[in-house]
Image (tube, grey):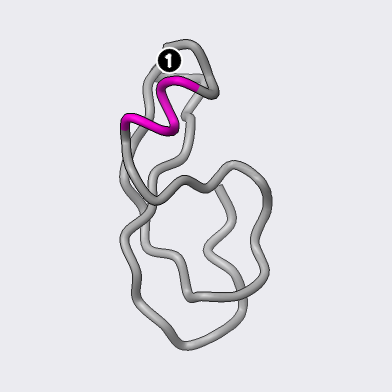
Amino acid sequence: MDPGKCRGKMIRYGYDPEKNQCVPFRWTGCGGNKNRFAKKHECELACRV
């Protein structure tokens, strides 16, 4: 999970392999990586948790 480089403060979900689950994190609104989902359910479907 990469928070990005802007100033926004949006809650997104990313897969945490150490916990084997999707967890919330603050995304800044730009940048980051593909491990970022608007909804926990979307993260769980994509990552097969």
Give the percent coordinates (x, y) of residue 42.
Answer: 41, 33
Where's residue 23, x and y in %?
A: 33, 36
The amino acid on which the numbered mark 1 sits, given as a three-letter code, is: Asn
Q: Does residue 37 appear left or right of residue 10 in this picture?
A: right
Q: Main secondary structure of the magenta part?
A: helix
Choose between 3 and 38: the one closer to the eye: 38
Q: Quadrant of residue 21?
A: top left
Number of numbered discs on residues? 1
Residue 36 falls left or right of residue 49: right
Q: Position of residue 44 (x, y in %)?
A: 40, 22
Q: Image height check: is 45 above or below 39? A: above
Badge 1, how many Cα within 10 Å: few under 14, some, many 20+? few
28 in magenta: no
3 lies left or right of 24: right
Q: Nearer the viewer, residue 38 or 24?
A: 38
The quadrant the C terminus occupies is top left
Read off the magenta span: 41-45
Q: Is residue 9 left or right of residue 1?
A: left
With respect to residue 20, does 36 lie above or below? below
Q: Quadrant of residue 41?
A: top left
**Residue at position x 61%, y 75% in the image:** 30
Coordinates of residue 31 in the picture (x, y in percent): 67, 69
Give the residue at x 46% y 39%: 14
What residue is disc 1 on? 20
Please tell me which residue is depicted at 44% across the width and 31% down the height of the picture. 43
User: Secondary structure under badge 1?
Assistant: loop
Q: Residue furthest bottom?
A: 7
